[in-house]
């Protein structure tokens, strides 16, 4: 069983390319899932237009995402380890109220199309097979 977390672009891109070590949520990490926990990052089919239209966090970090049309949508893009759930953090990426601390990001060689869900969710078996095949040899 592989679990995933959906996030809008360019946030998913930033996890793997701009050292985004925090994923902000309005809800805490589920208590039934022990930490640390390896999960997949799913780029949802929707964009966060705010992140493209203003300097925001990308202006602070100095790392800008590609144009919106160049980013994968509706796909599993990589994996991370969630090591903690915090309510305060010194990262410029932290906005709260909860932040999942992300470590050891591993980008897949190519996105794997998949429909996303809310919360932490289990990916379908066919997607899991494809992700496992692509992930062979990636440092976990």
Image: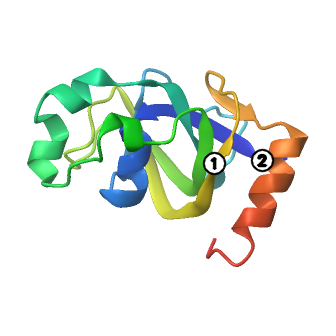
* Label 2 crowd bin: few (<14), some (14–19), many (20+), radius 10 Å: some
- Residue at the (47%, 61%) spot, across then down: 103
Quarter where residue 119 is shown: top right
Q: Which colour style is shown?
A: rainbow
Quarter where residue 116 is shown: top right
- Residue at the (23%, 49%) spot, across then down: 91
Q: Answer yes or no: do the residues labelled 1 and 2 have beta carbons within 8 Å?
A: yes
Quarter where residue 53 is shown: top left
Q: Residue furthest right?
A: 125
Horizontal side of 30 relative to 44 (left or right) equals: right
Residue 59, x across and y down, in percent: 10, 44
Horizontal side of 69 relative to 32 (left or right) equals: left
Vertical side of 50 occupied by 24: above or below: below
Residue 43, x across and y down, in percent: 53, 37
| Residue 87 seen from this side | no
Q: Nearer the viewer, residue 43 or 32?
A: 43
Residue that label 2 marks: 2
Label 2 SS: loop
Identify the image quadrant of the C terminus.
bottom right
Horizontal side of 27 relative to 130 (left or right) equals: left
Question: Which label sits on residue 40?
Answer: 1
Horizontal side of 111 relative to 133 (left or right) equals: left
Q: CA distance from mark 1 to mark 2?
A: 7 Å
- Residue at the (60%, 57%) spot, across then down: 110
Residue 84, x across and y down, in percent: 49, 49
| Residue 32 seen from this side | yes
């Amino acid at each position: 069983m592989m679990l995933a977390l959906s996030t809008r672009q360019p946030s998913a891109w930033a996890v793997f390319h701009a050292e985004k070590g925090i994923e902000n949520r309005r809800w805490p990490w589920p208590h039934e899932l022990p930490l640390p926990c390896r999960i997949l990052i799913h780029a949802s089919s929707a964009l966060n237009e705010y992140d493209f239209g203003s300097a925001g966090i990308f202006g602070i970090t100095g790392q800008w995402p590609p144009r919106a049309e160049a980013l994968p949508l509706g796909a599993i893009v990589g994996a991370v380890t969630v090591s903690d759930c915090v309510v305060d953090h010194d990262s410029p990426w932290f906005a709260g109220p909860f932040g999942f601390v992300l470590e050891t990001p591993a980008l897949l060689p190519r996105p794997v199309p998949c429909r996303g869900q809310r919360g932490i969710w289990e990916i379908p078996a066919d997607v899991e097979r494809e992700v496992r095949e692509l992930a062979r040899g990636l440092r976990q």
